[in-house]
């Protein structure tokens, strides 16, 4: 402690009491808590906004929509190397891989057929069972 | 002068409103009644469609990604390294990639409209529900068209590779 920091004695030679800043710990704790909540709510809000704006929530991470098993379908193809020569054999191998995955894509070419939302699927009487069941099953099969 | 301006403004408003109204067919009382009565089963069907669509979107997305990055891109790189760059194959790769982005964008729009449709109370608001259904159909059609175009591009790509092979 330097000389300047020492309390100056009063007339009686006693050290004068320095004014002590009172710290209200309880109040500060409440402010800290509220600030933490505000930050958490704000960041969560921003995250959710980003989540909704992108197609992430629609594509993959929608809870209950796609199970892990369904989502991670194994695609058994070798990555075509960007190194090496170009020959008929190489292109044959390429086409073999390409055909495999093209076949998979073709299998889903009607996945978003507009028939699934036809009037006949919505404007039907409960008693007319044929319209209801057949159309729904067709759509499920196609997928 | 002001009359002319008013006439133009009215014409624009009429054009816009007619375009808007032409979006949805007005249902008759029987049809509205049917939607209200079968609202529960309609909702179930829609949720089923949502679920299947999400799965198909994820699977198709991974196929397109694999084709684009593991096959098309690498083939073009290899051709370049062998001084055999093909303008046709490069263009097809670019177009495929652009269409893939378009597909993703349109699917997102479609799914948003479908989400909104499922939230409408078809028992109480059948006409509103139907108007939204027509919007969803339009969006779905765009997704469907994109899937078809991507399929066609794959066929074109295959043909181009076969032609390249023939030339070797």
Image (cartoon, coloured by chain):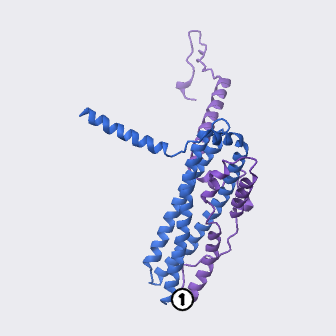
Chain colours: A purple, B blue
Question: Residue A81 lies in what quarter of the image?
Answer: bottom right
Location of residue B49 with respect to A31 vertically, above or below = below
Relative side of B119 to A53, left or right = right
Q: Chain of mark 1?
A: A
User: Which residue is located at x 49 percent, y 80 percent?
Assistant: B160
Observer-nearest of B70 and B24:
B24
The one of B86 and B13 positioned closer to us in this rendering = B13
Question: Which residue lies at the image location 44% right of the left edge and 40% below the top edge?
Answer: B17
**Residue closer to the observer: A42 or A23:** A42
In the rendered image, residue B16, in percent from the top left (x then y), is placed at 42, 42
Q: Quadrant of residue A79?
A: bottom right
Q: Secondary structure at mark 1?
A: loop
Residue A19, position as x, y percentages in the image: 58, 17
Inspect this view and state whether residue B104 appears.
Answer: no
Q: Could you tell me residue B21's position as x and y percent?
A: 49, 42
Q: Residue furthest top?
A: A12
Instruction: Classify 10 Å Cα crowding around label 1: few (below 14), some (14-19), many (20 and above).
Output: few
Residue B56 placement (x, y as % from top left): 65, 61
Residue identifier under label 1: A87
């Amino acid at each position: 402690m330097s000389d300047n920091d020492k309390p100056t004695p009063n007339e009686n030679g006693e050290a004068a009491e320095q004014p002590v800043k009172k710290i209200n710990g309880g109040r500060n704790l409440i402010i800290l808590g509220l600030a933490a909540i505000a930050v958490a709510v704000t960041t969560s809000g921003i995250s959710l906004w980003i989540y909704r704006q992108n197609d992430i929530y629609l594509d993959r991470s929608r809870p209950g929509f796609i199970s892990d098993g369904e989502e991670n379908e194994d695609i058994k193809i070798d990555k075509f190397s960007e190194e090496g020569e170009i020959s008929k054999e190489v292109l044959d191998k390429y086409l073999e891989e390409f055909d495999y995955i093209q076949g998979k894509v073709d299998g889903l070419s009607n996945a978003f057929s507009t028939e699934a939302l036809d009037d006949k699927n919505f404007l039907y009487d409960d008693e007319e069972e044929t319209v209801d069941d057949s159309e729904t099953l067709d759509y499920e099969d196609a997928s | 002068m002001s009359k002319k301006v008013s006439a133009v403004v009215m014409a624009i408003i009429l054009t816009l409103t007619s375009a808007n109204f032409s979006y949805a067919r007005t249902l008759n009382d029987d049809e509205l009644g049917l939607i209200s009565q079968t609202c529960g089963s309609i909702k179930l069907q829609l949720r089923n469609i949502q679920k299947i669509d999400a799965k198909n979107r994820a699977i198709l997305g991974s196929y397109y990604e694999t084709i684009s990055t593991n096959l098309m891109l690498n083939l073009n790189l290899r051709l370049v390294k062998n001084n055999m760059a093909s303008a046709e194959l490069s263009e097809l790769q670019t177009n495929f990639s652009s269409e893939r982005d378009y597909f993703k964008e349109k699917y997102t729009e479609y799914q948003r409209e479908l989400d909104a449709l499922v939230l409408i109370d078809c028992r109480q608001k059948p006409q509103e529900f139907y108007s939204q259904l027509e919007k969803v159909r339009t969006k779905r059609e765009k997704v469907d068209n994109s899937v078809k175009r991507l399929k066609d591009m794959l066929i074109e790509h295959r043909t181009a590779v076969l032609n390249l092979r023939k030339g070797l």
